[in-house]
Image (tube, coloured by chain):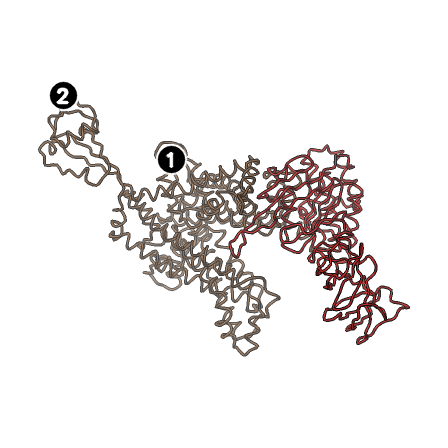
Amino acid sequence: MASKEKKGVRLEHISKIYKDPKTGKDFYAVNDVSLDIEPGSFVTLLGPSGCGKTTTLRMIAGFESPDAGEIYLGKEAINALTPNKRDTAMVFQSYALFPHYNVYDNIAYGLKLRKVPKKEMDERVAKILELVELEGMESRMTNQLSGGQQQRVALARAMVVEPGVLLFDEPLSNLDAKLRVSMRTEIRRIQQALGITAVYVTHDQAEAMAISDKIIIMNKGVIAQMGTPEEIYHHPKSEFVADFIGEVNFLTGTIRKVDGRSCTLAIGGHDVTVDNPDGFPVGKDCKVVLRPEAGILSDEGALPCRVVLSCFMGAYQNYHVMVGDTLVKLSDYCPVGRKVYKVGDTAYLSFREGCVHML
Amino acid sequence: MKKRQSAALERKKFFADPVMVVTICLLTALLALFILYPLAMLLLDSVYVRETNMIPLDTVIAGTAEMTYGDAGGHPTVEILDNKGKPATIAVDSLNTSFGYLFAKNGRMLKEGNEIDPANTYVKVARNYLSFDAFPRIFKDYTFNRAFYNTLLLGMITSFGSVIIGLLFAYVDCYVDVRSRAVKRMFDVVSTLPVVSPPFVLSLSMILLFGRGGLITRELLGIYDSDVYGLGGIAIVQTLTFFPVCYMMLKGLLKNIDPSMEEAARNMGASRMKVFTTVTLPLMLPGLGNAFLVTFIESVADFANPMMIGGSYDTLATTIYLRITGGSYDITGAAAMAVVLLAITLVLFLIQKYYLEAKTAATLTGKASRARALIDDRSVRVPLTALCSLLSAFVIMMYIAIPFGALFKLWGRDYSLSLKWFQQLFRDDGFKAFTDSFVLSLIASPITALLSMIISYLVVKKKFKTKGFIEFVSMLAMAVPGTVLGVGFIRGFAGGVFRTGFMQGIYGTGVILVIVFVVRSLPVGTRSGISALRQIDKSIEESAYDLGAGSAKVFMSVTLPLIKDSFLSGLVTTFVRSITAISAIILLVTPRYLLITCRINEFAEKGAYGVACAYATILIIITYSAIVLMNFMIRHFGTSKAVRLKEE
């Protein structure tokens, strides 16, 4: 179906200024953002509310105009084009289905505007309905559908016009948790099947990880980090990114000795050996980014700690331990057959090799 | 901050949509031409004086003429006319020097030696100038002062009465356990009757029931000198006409009060009375003020009732009408009075719209969390229900008097039934009156309905320069009394736009009547359209836009279908309002068109109540059918049908 040329999206130094309704002062909602989204890839804009991700998406769609910079769709500069002239299709948070049309007319809306012949239109609608697994529902009114079904219709309506780029504005946030998980897999599957370029906005980091080729983390109008989900998770470039994606503990220490690609770090007077891929010099104060699953408790090691919480969670044993006066949260997966520490026990914390990272 | 390029981009995008640009320009022009311009002309008329003096030539030559020209500013033009009003020429040297100077500047070329008779020749001195004299003049004018005072007094009494009765009804409806379904049904009837009836029907029945030959006063009570004409009569009639509006407004408010607030007060030991005075009433205060002002504006603007039942009690609206149609034809005075009347309604309207409406919304937000436990205490229920039932019965009786007025052979004398008034009506141009009213109203309704939906769409969903103007002006028409608008249209279009003759052709035709109908109903339609559109998620239109539809396409394929109910009701409301309109129309209608309301007014003034009632009866049947048809259409073709499917 995706016979059309796939298009990439390029943002060059895009800024958007808004007026704060309370103070009346101008502020940057999006500040000098540059991005290059490759054709056919699935890119997610992730960030806390107010970080500028939705504004960025709406600028790509054309609902907002940037105050600086240029947006390209494929090779075309589209700044001055109205949304209806842009080769984009958006899936809205509220689905935005036309309540006075049935499923067929909703999906065929964009095709009618493109003056697609009736026969081809029927075929394309039938095909897309099959893809979103809603065959036979053509004549249903939208309010007779469940939330998940409405979501699929919205998706089908956007995809059937074979846009150069598909835009998603938090499409799953109105669904319940279980449906959200299955729908995100669906969206990924369908996007892969069609090979359409997709830009997806969400504040749910699990969703972003599950669905994207590339994640762009935004904060206060600027890009905090760009990369694959693995890069972002394992090598966050800032405390903000580390904190925003997944659970994290920070342990502070000073580098005492550098030895090739690893170094010795003093944390609260105890020496620990840590990877040093960035080549931080001796004497630098560093933060160890420790994911809960990257710490191991044992009876001997370098870093003594005291267990203050021990709790069985099924898949893992949850510990809170004090390293000096820093609280560290740990998850010990598959604890069966290993020692389970109790509150008050003293244990030693060590890091799983290659799993910690310094800032 | 850096220079913004978004403004330039938005402008580019805006102009990329020619249909919308043209629509906005057209709308702005239309609103300016048909609402602002007439009002502006009115304002201009009240300060722009056109003065002509005819001075006998012999007094000029003798030097005894009163030369009032040239001292108050403005450039006088001077012409010499003979006693038949034809231009005449005289020798320059026969005039004294000051006139000679004027002639040199403004007069026509004079040839020497033409023989004229100075005693039969006049010097016409005409000049136009700005002056605020008209205002001090009318403020000294006894008739005006009387009318001004009368208008405000009437407004106070009517709005006070309407709000109290409206509150009583709303309270009983929302708080009291009215057991009887018949009583509930009666409330519904009372609240819809004023909507379907022409505005002056109650005056008519007031005269029929309580007048000198009144069925109740004379036949039942034996009072032979009852006088319904005057303040008392108008106040009663207006209160009965307007209180249902207050009832509906206040009912909406009371429904939004969360019962748990009152329960909390009760729980802390307050009596019912205490709860009402310390919780319910304070919460409703802005709403009550709102209802008061809306009624006040209606009362002040009302023309038909004071005209019919006012007797010698003249209000501003009727005084203006009489100034124009009566012998004096004091157009500057009438214009100045219209400006005063407009100022009153406009100030009240602005307070109501921008202050009280916001306040009402602020104190009463959200919906009641659950149903209220109704009061079924006998000591409260019985007297309140009885009072409301009595009032409802009274109103219904007033309306029933109308068809009987048409069916009785001769009211006051012969109460046997006959169809002679209907027969007379149809013998006597009645059919033409119905056709004219019907056709003109029918033309006005789709125009108004569509225009108001377009305006609502632009105002709610789009950003553009003249948005504030369009919104304000289309709402402004609500504050303009019909009489004022009528005078404005006369002054604005009788000589063409700016007296240039442009569009003069529409004056005196059906076109101007249709325009007035549209202007009068536009605010109602727009208001309902705006509130309907605010309910619709912005992203529904955005998604259509995003899929490739231009503004016009979005409006036709998405917006309009979603506010179909509002469109349909705009259609019918305009029709009903137009066919029952009188205040502006009576000043603009020409003998080419016979309108029902004007006929009723005519016959009622002549005392031919039988025919007037026959007209009114048929009119009520027409409007009632229109409302029934509307409800049917909304039920079967409206948007709510799709929504209802979900609930089933």
- Amino acid tagged 2: Glu
User: Which subunit holds the residue at mark 2?
Assistant: B
- The answer to which of B154 and B613 lies nearer the viewer is B154
Chain coloured brown: which letter?
A: B
Colour given to chain A in the rendered image: red
Q: CA distance from mark 1 to mark 2?
A: 41 Å
* Horizontal and vertical percent position of residue A52: 63, 51
Q: Looking at the picture, tell me which residue is in the foreground, B157 or A314.
A: A314
Q: How many neighbours does mark 2 have within 10 angstroms: few (below 14), some (14-19), or many (20 or more)? A: few
Q: Position of residue A207 (x, y in %)?
A: 75, 54
Q: Secondary structure at mark 1?
A: helix
* Image: A306 above or below A202: below
Residue toward you, B584 or A2: A2
* In the rendered image, the vertical position of residue A341 relative to residue A276, given as above or below: below
Q: Residue at label 1?
A: B497
The residue wearing badge 2 is B112
Asked if residue B571 can be seen in this view, the reply is no
Residue B51 in the image: state x and y as whole percent.
24, 38
Disc 1 chain ID: B
Residue beneath the point at 78% across and 52% down: A230
Q: Are marks 1 and 2 on the same chain?
A: yes
Q: Which residue occupies 40% across, 47% down? A: B482
Element assignment for label 2: loop
Extreme-left residue of the structure = B62
Q: Do we see residue B469 in this rendering?
A: yes
> For this view, does A280 lie left or right of residue B385?
right
Residue at position x 54%, y 45% in the image? B2
Q: Tag 1: residue type?
A: Val
Where in the figure is residue B635, as x and y percent of width and height?
Answer: 62, 50
